[in-house]
Amino acid sequence: MADHIPKGRPEILFPLFAGLETLDGVGPKTAKHYAGIHVETPRDLIFTLPAGGLDRTRRASIREVPLPGPATVEVTIGTHIKPKGRGPYRIEVEDAQTTFHLIFFHARGDYLERAHPPGARRVVSGKVELYDGIAQMAHPDHMLLPEEALGIPEYEPVYPLAQGLTQRGVHKAVQSALTKIDILGEWADLNTVKDRKWPAWHDAITAVHAPRNASDLSRAAPPRERLAYDELFAHQLTLALARATRRRKAGIQSKGDGTLRAKVLKALPYTPTGAQTRTVKEIAADMAAPHRMNRLLQGDVGSGKTLVALMALLIAVEAGGQAVMMAPTSILAGQHYLNLKPLADAAGVVCEIFTGADKGAERRAKLEALKRGDIHILVGTHAVFQDDVEFNSLRLAVVDEQHRFGVRERVRLSQKGEAADILVMTATPIPRTLSLAQYGDMDLSVLDEKPPGRTPVKTALISTARMDEVVAHLHRALDEGRQAYWVCPLVEESEVYDATAAEERFKMLRAAFGEGKVALVHGQMKPKEKDAIMAAFKAGETRVLVATTVIEVGVDVPNASIMVIEQAENFGLAQLHQLRGRVGRGSAESTCLLMYRAPLGETATRRLQVMRETEDGFRISEEDLAIRGAGDVIGTAQSGLPRFRVADLETHGALMALAQSDARALLTLDPELTGARGQSARVLLWLMEQDKAIRLLDVG
């Protein structure tokens, strides 16, 4: 099958992957400047689309053009006005209706006089502005004989530039690169192309470099949309290949008899939601299948992922094996352990925790029990990656908060159990587009219902200037026996500064509420210290927990019903949503106070209003994508989110789902990619430089 796709780049693409010096007007020196716009080959250049355009339609006079603005007119050259002192060189010219000046700074006057003598006819094109009441065009982009000017396009594309590059030079290089393109075949589904009125690839790439007006530059213009689709299709085809490759490798079939799960359900004080039941079914089917499971479980804050994870862990145990649940921090691992242990006990299953804090004899005893198979479910941090951690029969690994684990950790984890199934969980609702871009090789389960008994959280915006009122409100709540979180502002992206800000706020609140009622937790503390503070808060010994964002994920204190977030305007939407999810876990009415410093900018206002309007994490994530753009939403650098040249995930998001279903359908019909469309798809993978990805993506 398609494992063997990278056999070597097809010859038809050689000219596009040659050096830039093969293009007209590009020498070795200029070629180096192209690195500034991320261009190394003719292929990169044809995918560097115009960022704008200039209207060069020929006019009779500059009077027909709104000023300041671009104009292209035929003129008669008049008087050359030489500069006095350091002023510019001017040439007076006359079009059909008026006179104006051409301006040249640091010009060689003798050259200009020889090249453009008085009385000569020229076509000039450039930006005309009024200066002291006189119309002038500084350094015309074009100044040509009328017969030569026929080559000026009516609408000229404008390319991104770097130092050492000019519009004229880039335009010439692009035109030269376009001559090197051959007909590459059709890899897109013909019905899709027809329905969407897209041009063929060759016509699309030519059209985007020859816009006729501003609407041709729109991301929604059919040629641009077509090229965006091709890029997304190549990406999704790569992910689909990785998925298909992984599915061919034998996994462990884990079929449970349901006895342990039945015991847990009996012990629960509530009935699982429809979404939880559906998701457990999807996971059970995957685990029973002969290939390895690689599933992403996406659930909003408080949607009950822990129960789904436990059911999956129990299937592994029912089938006679072991399971591990991984969390990114010791706080979160401890939280999971506290939640899972009573239910595991009810099922008669041994559940143990393993973190970096385990030392000496205790650590050795746990490792021996794990190796013998006496521990059925292990909850831990990345400490479980250590070489001396050996399982007797690992069937399932559940990874919580995937975005904090790199792909490398996923591989190391899967090596612990030769073919263990993998379930990745995230409480960060990811917009559908991004989850397809990032996790398109995985199967997706979504928890989109909240279990009964979760209290809606009332969200209010309040200015920092009213700090005294907030403290008074908190006083009353504490007197009623309630608990509160107080999240401190983000300072300069630095944990040290964050900790200092938190220390200051802690001192102020301790003075307000009294010794012993207020505790402080931040990222600079040792794990043991943090765990002890969290435990005291959970037990109700302290009433207010002042914190940096270390409490963002997974902390569960049902009695805490107030969340104060200082300088909420500095936080991203996803983060605010996560923090708010810490309250509303008990029966008490819950409040989230978003404190902001006035005046608020437009973006910050929109963010905070979205928080006030909805608790739906998926809606919030879509808004976040619209406000910040894809790269920022999940931090492109660490997210594994691909960088696209043409496709824009905000504009072309709907194409991502289409590209995924097309890619999977093509591989179902032609797993070897040997048919006519399959062969073209191979060319596309090479054209989009996915050859490396195919070699690297077989991760599971």
Image: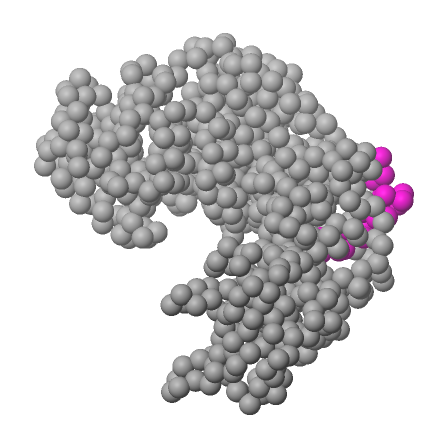
Residue at 34% in and 21% down: 457
Q: Residue furthest front?
A: 97
Residue 480: x percent and y percent?
A: 17, 17
Measuring from the top left, give residue 609's x and y in whole percent.
Answer: 36, 30
Residue 160, image x, y percentages: 57, 62
- How is the protein colored in the picture? one colour
Magenta residues: mostly which secondary structure? Answer: helix
Where residue 259 sits, quadrant-wise, is: top right
User: What residue is shown at x 56% (from left), y 63% (from top)?
Assistant: 97
Say whether residue 626 is left or right of residue 95: left
Q: Residue at x 89, y 44 (%)?
A: 676
| Residue 138: % across, % down | 50, 71
Is the C terminus in the top left, top right, bottom left or bottom right quadrant? top right
Q: Which of the 4 image quadrants contains residue 73?
A: bottom right
Question: What is the magenta range?
Answer: 668-690
Determine which quarter of the picture holds residue 582: top left
Residue 133 in view of the camera? yes
| Total residue callouts | 0
Residue 9 falls left or right of residue 571: right
Of all residues, the one furthest to the bottom in this rendering is 110
**Residue 684 drawn in magenta:** yes
Q: From the viewer's side, name the closer residue of 128 and 214.
A: 128
